[in-house]
Amino acid sequence: MKKYKLIYHLPVFLLAIYTLSGCETVIDAKLDTGPSQLSVDAILTDQAGQQTIRLTQTAAYFNSNTPPAALSATVTVSDDAGKTYAFTDSDNDGYYTWKPTGNDTLGHIGRTYQLNITYQNETYRATSKMNRVPSVDSITFVKTKLNPFSTTEGYRAEFYARDLPGAVDYYRIRYFRNNELQNRARDITVAQDGAFQGSADTDGLMFIRPIRRSINPDSLYALNDVVKVEVHSLTLEAFTFWQELQTQVTNGGLFATPPTNVPTNIINTKSGGRNGVGFFMTSAVRSRTAQVIPTNLRPDL
C-alpha cells in the first residue's frame, strides 16, 4: 500500500519541481546613489614606528572599483595626557601618516584617544581607549591530516595566552603565514576573556582551544613555514564592530538575513551633516613568531 501511494504522488512532485525551476524572472535593480560619505579605516597601536589612517569616500553599491581617496583632510589624534599627533597625506593618496621623531610610541595602555578629521567643511570625531593585552606565551605545531578522510598531511598551529584577571577584556586575534596576513572573513577572530562571548566565566584563564587554534589556514602549514600571531586589545564597541563585520561579510545562502549597516563610532559634529562610516580603534598588541621545525612540534593529544 505504501509503495502504491509513493508512485501515485511522484508525478505531482516532479511537476512541482519543474514548475518552480521554470519560474525565473530577471530583476534589474535600480538603486539610487546617495551622497558619498567619509569612510575611516583607523587602527592605532602601541607598536613602534609609523601609524596610518586611511580616508576614502563611499561609492555606489554595485561599483567594484577602488573607493576614491578622501584628499585634503586635516587629521589629528589627541590623548588625555595632553599630546596631539598630526597625520599628513604626503603622497596625496588618502593614507594619512604620523611618524615618530624619537623613541616614543603614539599608543600607551590606559590612555584615551580622540580622532579629529576636518573634511569638506565638516568635522568628524571618534574616541577610543587603549586597553591592556596579555602576552603570547608560545606557539606549537602538531602533524595531522587535512581531514579524517584525507591522505594529505600538514601541521596545525596552536598558540597559548592567558587572559588578564580582574576585569572583562576583549581581544582580536590576527595571524600571518610567511609574513602574509591571513584576512579572509573566517579569519576574523575575536574573544571575550579568551573565550566566546556568553560562554562560561574564563576570567584569568588560558584562552580556550577553539581560539588558540583559530590561526590555521585551510591547507594547514608546511614544514619550515613561519607563523606570527598577534593579540590586539579591543574596546567593547570595537569588539562589536568586528563581530558585526564578520556577520555581514559572510551573510549569504538560503538562510541569509537582510543586510544591515555595520556600527561606526565616527560622528559628524555638525547637526544634519553627512554621517561618517568606518571605525576608529586603538589596540595594544602583543605577538610571537615561531617556525614549523622539529623543536616546535608536539604530539597530537
Image: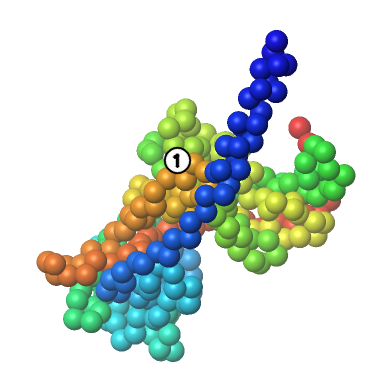
Q: Is residue 209 above or below residue 182?
A: above
Q: Quadrant of the N terminus?
A: top right
Q: In the figure, is residue 252 to the left or right of 120? A: right
Image location (x, y in percent) of residue 7: 70, 23
Q: Which residue is labeled 1 in the image?
A: 192
Q: Nearer the viewer, residue 165 or 254?
A: 254
Residue 37 in which image quadrant: bottom left
Q: Characterize the local packing of mark 1: few (<14), some (14-19) or many (20 or more) Cα atoms within 10 angstroms.
A: many
Q: Quadrant of the C terminus?
A: top right
Question: Which residue corresponds to the image point at 25% horizontal and 79% vertical from the top-left?
Answer: 119
Inspect the image, locate mark 1, and give the three-letter code of the amino acid beneath it: Gln
Image location (x, y in percent) of residue 230: 56, 56
Q: Nearer the viewer, residue 186 or 89?
A: 186
Q: Nearer the viewer, residue 227 or 295?
A: 227
Image location (x, y in percent) of residue 56: 38, 76
Residue 36 in which image quadrant: bottom left
Question: Which residue corresponds to the image point at 35% horizontal and 80% vertical from the top-left?
Answer: 70
Question: Which residue corresponds to the image point at 44% horizontal and 52% vertical from the top-left?
Answer: 248
Q: How is the image coloured?
A: rainbow
Residue 131 in view (yes/no): no
Residue 256 in view (yes/no): yes
Question: Which residue corresponds to the image point at 39% horizontal and 81% vertical from the top-left?
Answer: 69
Q: Nearer the viewer, residue 222 or 102?
A: 222
Outermost left residue: 271
Outermost top residue: 1
Instruction: Indicate the secondary structure of the residue bearing disc 1.
Output: strand
Image location (x, y in percent) of residue 273: 17, 70
